[in-house]
Image: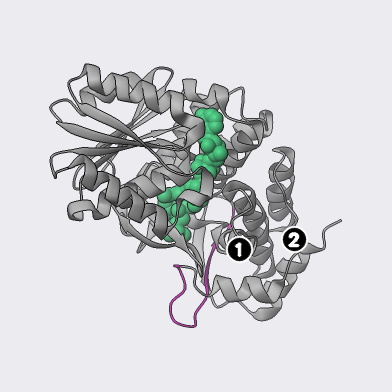
Amino acid sequence: MRRVTVAGERPYDVVIGAGAQAELGLLLAGTAKAAVVHAPPLAALAGAAVETLQTAGVAAEAVVVPDGEAAKTAAVAARLWDELGRLGLTRSDAVVGVGGGAVTDLAGFVAATWLRGVRVVHLPTSVLGMVDAAVGGKTGIDTAAGKNLVGAFHPPAGVLADTDALAGLPEAEFRSGLAEVVKCGLIADAGILDLLTADPTGRRDTEELVERAVRVKADAVGQDLYDTGVREFLNYGHTLGHAIERVEDFGWRHGEAVAVGLVFAAELAGQAGLLTAAEVARHRDLVAAMGLPTVYRGDWAALQAVMRVDKKARGATLRFVVLDGIGNPRILADPEQAWLDAAWAAVSEAA
Ligand SMILES: NC(=O)c1ccc[n+]([C@@H]2O[C@H](COP(=O)([O-])OP(=O)(O)OC[C@H]3O[C@@H](n4cnc5c(N)ncnc54)[C@H](O)[C@@H]3O)[C@@H](O)[C@H]2O)c1
Ligand SMILES: O=C(O)C(=O)C[C@@H](O)[C@H](O)[C@H](O)COP(=O)(O)O
Ligand SMILES: [Zn+2]
């Protein structure tokens, strides 16, 4: 089993490997009650988690929420608070999130807010959840204005990334998760880029890729839980990516939108003279080889309006994560409109 410790006020481990789920009973030993939150497609895995907990003496109950991004709404959060009330969940009890990033974001947010904070343990079941969403304590839901606009920083008590769960993950979801992996490679770990260049499917080296990406995330989060410094670099590709998700009414997969956002950010850095043409091409070629989109045709004015509510914006100042050379992220504030337009042209008009 691979283990990555996330530093902080209450450090916790991300356990990665086949059978990691079995550690759930140990993690929550002595807990009286747990609510196991999951969407319908993960009923079997959630059922197994409930059984593991019951065997460990925890009165666990499954609570079903809608699948995918539809779970990340205020209405669903309110229903979940009602469920926790019905179960009588107290401050010594716990919430368990079983599923992709949408479910762990919701479960984490509800745990952060219920009684002003109860423990949450995540059992991510998608690549994206394992490498990113379940780790680091960013929790949240969407609003009409955009992605993750309501939320809290609430680190989990533990993350069990059981790679056996990936057997049932649809191929498109697997690929989508790899967008966050290649993001980590581009901002911090050339080894990830080498592995994905050798096998762009990510199938040959899945566990190593998951561990490496988790290490990149843990390193940033351990230094900057509250997103005021180095953690912002984990948002590489997300300024346009989140805007695409919003404009598409959350019908695009997160990783697919981020993939286009990575190419856009590289083009922007090219315009700013921070990346060479070859480095920009490396972004596009690798993302394309991984079967992820590099092109998006849409309403540029609408996308720019949504980007203004990106969490990195400060007042009227738009701030983008860009690379000053591969592996060297920095913030680019208020880029020239001509650079933005040229980067947009490059992702929207590409043949
Ligand atoms: N909190 C964070 O730091 C953070 C980081 C990255 C992404 N996110 C959020 O995560 C969400 C995306 O997560 P996602 O890509 O996992 O999407 P998702 O949670 O919407 O899951 C995608 C689909 O895959 C299914 N699925 C998941 N695991 C499965 C399995 N093992 N077998 C069969 N089906 C399975 C789900 O039921 C769903 O239909 C977005 O809302 C994004 O904003 C959060
Ligand atoms: O953990 C972070 O910090 C990230 O930026 C990771 C992102 O991949 C993730 O999508 C996150 O949810 C985005 O956060 P937001 O603050 O831009 O909503
Ligand atoms: Zn993301």
Is 339 or 129 nearer to us in this picture? 129
Find disc 1 in the rendering and name its residue. Answer: 240
Tags 2 and 1 touching, CB below 8 Å = yes
User: Which residue is painted at 48% across and 24% down in the image?
Assistant: 165
Instruction: Where is residue 184? Give x, y as percent.
Output: 51, 45
Find disc 2 in the rendering and name its residue. Answer: 347
State yes or no: residue 70 in magenta: no
Which SS does the magenta portion mostly show?
Answer: loop
Q: Which residues are magenta?
A: 311-325
In the rendered structure, the answer to whether residue 223 lies left or right of residue 171 reads left
Report crowding for label 2: few under 14, some 14 to 19, many 20 or more residues within 10 A (C-alpha): many
In the rendered image, which quarter contains the N terminus?
A: top left
Under circle 1, the secondary element is helix
Q: Amino acid at mark 2?
A: Val
In the rendered structure, the answer to whether residue 265 lies left or right of residue 155 reads right
Under circle 2, the secondary element is helix
The residue most toward the right is 351
